[in-house]
């Protein structure tokens, strides 16, 4: 892997964009999902829109991004955000809508309201669903990022891939591909899997050995 | 012949143990006035329910499925807004659920991501208690239900009976003005249920909380209640409001208690026979049917003959 020096730098650049876009996605997507589940008017108006837009492959956002943000970092981050935001929102909405109504009634009779209710009951109760959404969002974000970087060359792993192609350097291309797989798998399998297992065990959803 | 004589003897022996409730002076703690509720599909769940609950009373709402007892309890808890009538606690109208009327459901409804202690702490903090006070209070009530060793267990690690005890501790720790219980022991096995009766009786005898307890089990109602309000369904209404004058603590196999449960059983059977006439909901004809011993709904048995006659 002769690209070692450049690989590390490219990886960091890519992951940096990913982190930005993904965090933004999560910060907007989770509250959006919760709002969709709880606020009837919002659900009736926005849900068809959300579901429809979700069907749009993330790469299709790139032309719009380039027009709006020009040839900049922001364009790529925008693509990442749009790619994953809706998946997170939809999964979160499912998670919240699937909460046992008895739990909500119990919160009511115990006088749990306002922020304590949202942060202390709604989010934890929907957490298994939210984590599924975050996991899905992550893989969408990763794909969106790669698509964006390939088409709009500006540093990062995508650029390395393109370079490899232009230089007809198959080992480089394959090396970068491996790096991409490794990064994606590491986060998916290690971080999310761990998170999921711990949450499920505590919530009592884990299968007993 | 022997059966008839037995019945007569039982009746005579227990004639003063189950009597219609006498009106009490003073402001009712919980006033239920002419409450009725009709569901969207026009099923009349409740009709003309008038009950005065006084402080410290243990009232059992007894009736078969579909008689509206749970609907009434939900209305008291504020989870259902009755389509007619008026409910007030300590003189103030109730609007929506709140921790002054905690409802213990049929399922424990514990927060699955919190331990036993945290479940209690969470609701105590919501009520506004400081951390230290909340901790102490949580510990005290967990001890009352004999679960000290399980403070750090998660709900899915508890048995049904244990989870129900936590739910009870959580409700009691909130110190509600009225404790509402919707067939809380219905899902438990007979032995656990009997332990829960003992637990509830002992806690109540010490604290004298105002309790409204819904059940379809006649024995349970007689073991636990000072007052048994018998309801019938289609439409949901009060049949009789009876005072139980047995000494506490009560044994479910006590002869007197068994005789009383027989009386109530026949009362319910007659009500059911009367309402089996093929009439749809809220039929006027059924209400006016004045069968032997079947009382009209409304004011708690004061104007009607005592249980002794006509049964």
Image: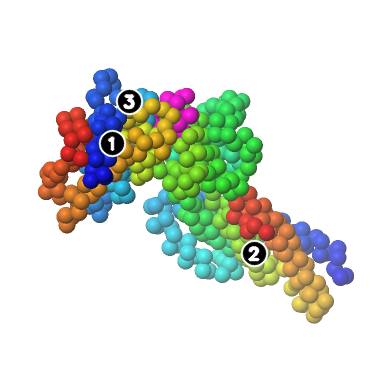
Mark 2 and mark 1: Cα distance apart in space: 75 Å
Q: Is residue B65 magenta?
A: no
Within-10-Å neighbours for mark 3: few <14, some 14–19, many 20+: some
Q: Secondary structure at mark 2?
A: helix
Label at residue B54 = 3
Quick one: B287 or B189, which is closer to the camera?
Answer: B189
Q: Are marks 2 and 1 in contact (CB under 8 Å)?
A: no
Q: Is residue A98 left or right of residue B3?
A: right
Say which chain tag 2 marks. Answer: A
Q: CA distance from mark 3 to mark 2?
A: 61 Å
Closest to the observer, A166 or B311: B311
Q: Is residue A201 visible?
A: yes
**Chain bearing mark 3:** B
Where are the magenta residues, as a range?
A: B200-212
* Mark closer to the observer (3, 2): 3
The spot of residue A68 in percent (x, y) is 56, 60
Residue sitting at x 29%, y 44%: B265
Give the numbered dot on residue B10.
1
Measured along the vertical axis of the image, is residue B110 above or below residue A140? above
**Is tag 3's residue or tag 1's residue first in the polypeptide sequence?**
1
Decide if residue B273 is on the left or right side of residue A176. left
Q: Are marks 3 and 2 in contact (CB under 8 Å)?
A: no
Question: Does A146 sit above or below residue A165?
Answer: above
Q: In the rendered structure, find residue A139 and report the number of the disc placed on it.
A: 2
Does the rendering let one see residue A148?
no
In this rendering, position of residue A110 left or right of residue A172? left
């Amino acid at each position: 892997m002769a690209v070692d020096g450049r690989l590390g730098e490219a990886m960091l650049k890519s992951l940096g964009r990913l982190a930005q876009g993904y965090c933004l996605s999560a910060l907007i997507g989770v509250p959006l999902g919760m709002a969709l589940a709880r606020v009837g008017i919002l659900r009736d108006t926005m849900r068809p829109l959300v579901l429809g837009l979700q069907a749009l492959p993330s790469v299709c956002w790139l032309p719009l991004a380039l027009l709006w943000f020009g040839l900049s970092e922001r364009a790529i981050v925008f693509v990442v955000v749009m790619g994953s935001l809706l998946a997170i929102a939809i999964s979160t909405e499912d998670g919240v809508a699937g909460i046992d109504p008895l739990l909500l009634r119990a919160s009511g009779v115990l006088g749990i309201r306002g922020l304590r209710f949202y942060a202390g009951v709604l989010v934890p109760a929907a957490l298994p669903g939210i984590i599924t959404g975050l996991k899905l969002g992550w893989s969408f974000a990763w794909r969106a990022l790669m698509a964006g970087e390939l088409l709009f060359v500006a540093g990062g792993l995508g650029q390395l891939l393109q370079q490899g192609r232009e230089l007809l350097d198959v080992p480089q291309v394959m090396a970068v591909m491996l790096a991409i797989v490794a990064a994606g798998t590491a986060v998916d399998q290690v971080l999310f899997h761990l998170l999921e297992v711990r949450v499920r065990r505590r919530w009592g959803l884990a299968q007993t050995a | 012949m022997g059966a008839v004589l037995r019945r007569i003897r039982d009746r005579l022996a227990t004639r003063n143990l189950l009597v219609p409730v006498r009106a009490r002076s003073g402001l009712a703690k919980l006033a239920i006035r002419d409450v009725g509720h009709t569901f969207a599909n026009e099923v009349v769940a409740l009709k003309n329910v008038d009950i005065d609950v006084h402080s410290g009373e243990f009232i059992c709402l007894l009736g078969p499925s579909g008689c509206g007892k749970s609907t009434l309890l939900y209305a008291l808890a504020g989870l259902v807004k009755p389509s007619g009538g008026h409910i007030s606690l300590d003189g103030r109208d109730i609007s929506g659920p709140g921790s002054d009327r905690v409802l213990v459901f049929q399922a424990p409804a514990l927060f699955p991501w919190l331990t036993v202690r945290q479940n209690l702490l969470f609701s105590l903090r919501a009520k506004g208690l400081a951390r230290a006070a909340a901790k102490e209070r949580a510990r005290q009530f967990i001890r009352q239900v004999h679960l000290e060793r399980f403070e750090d267990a998660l709900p899915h690690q508890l048995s049904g009976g244990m989870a129900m005890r936590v739910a009870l501790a959580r409700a009691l720790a909130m110190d509600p003005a009225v404790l509402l219980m919707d067939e809380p022991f219905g899902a438990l096995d007979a032995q656990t249920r009997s332990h829960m009766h003992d637990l509830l009786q002992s806690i109540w005898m010490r604290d004298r909380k105002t309790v409204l307890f819904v059940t379809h089990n006649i024995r349970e109602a007689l073991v636990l209640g000072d007052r048994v309000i018998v309801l019938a369904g289609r439409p949901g209404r009060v049949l009789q409001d009876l005072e139980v004058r047995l000494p506490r603590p009560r044994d479910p196999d006590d002869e007197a208690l068994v005789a009383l449960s027989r009386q109530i059983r026949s009362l319910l059977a007659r009500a059911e026979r009367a309402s089996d006439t093929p009439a749809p909901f809220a039929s006027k004809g059924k209400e006016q049917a004045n069968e032997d011993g079947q009382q009209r709904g409304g004011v708690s048995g004061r104007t009607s003959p005592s249980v002794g006659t006509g049964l």
